[in-house]
Amino acid sequence: MNARDLEAALLERCSVAARDDAQAARDQREANVFYLAAMLVRSRFPCASSSLLQASDRYFAVHPEERLAPGDIVRKGWIPSLPRMRDMLAHHLVGLA
C-alpha cells in the first residue's frame, strides 16, 4: 500500500467511527488518529467528534501507555497535514452536522 492508499484507508476508518459510536480503534495508530481527527472536526461536527473520541478512549482504556501528543502523531506521519485531514474528513462527514 502506498501513502495515499494508507491515508484513504485511515480516513475511511475515521468516517466509520464518526458515524458509529460503538466503534473502537483497532490499534495505536487508529486510536491516536481518531483522537486528533475528533479535535479537528469538533466545532463543525460535534456528534462525529464525540464518536471518534469514544472510539479512541476505548482503545486507550486498555493501552494508556500508547497515547501520543498531537505533535507526535504528525511527526510519525500518521497524519501528513492537519488542514488536509480536517478538509477530507469534513467532506466524508457532510450530512452529519
Image: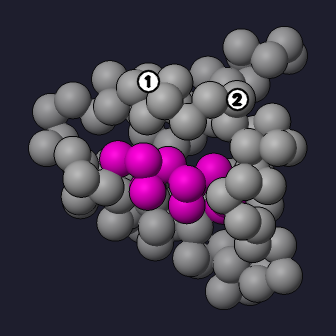
Q: In the drawing, what numbered circle is on residue 88?
A: 1
Q: Quadrant of the N terminus?
A: top right
Q: Residue at x 56, y 76 (%)?
A: 57
Residue 35 in which image quadrant: bottom right
Tell me which secondary structure the magenta stretch mostly adopts: helix
Residue 92: % across, % down? 35, 27
Q: In this view, does 87 lie to the left or right of 67?
A: left
Question: As shown in the figure, which amino acid type bears the numbered disc 2?
Answer: Pro
Magenta stretch: residue 2 in it? no
Q: Which residue is drawn at 21% across and 29% down?
A: 94
Q: Mark 2 points at which residue?
A: 80
Compare residues 23 and 49 and report the one nearer the observer: 49
Q: Residue at x 74, y 25 (%)?
A: 6
Compare residues 64 and 39 and report the one nearer the observer: 39
Q: In the drawing, what numbered circle is on residue 57?
A: none
Magenta stretch: residue 32 in it? yes
Residue 34: % across, % down? 56, 54
Q: In this view, does 51 lie above or below 90?
A: below
Mark 1 surroundings: few (<14), some (14-19) or many (≥20) residues within 10 A: few
Q: Is residue 26 visible?
A: no
Q: In this view, does 51 lie to the left or right of 23?
A: left
What span is in magenta? 31-41
Q: In this view, does 69 lie above or below 12?
A: below
Q: Is residue 21 above or below residue 95?
A: below
- Label 2 to label 1: alpha-carbon separation: 12 Å
User: Sequence order check: which comes first, mark 2 or mark 1?
Assistant: 2
Residue 26: % across, % down? 71, 58
Residue 21 in which image quadrant: bottom left
Total residue callouts: 2
Mark 2 surroundings: few (<14), some (14-19) or many (≥20) residues within 10 A: some
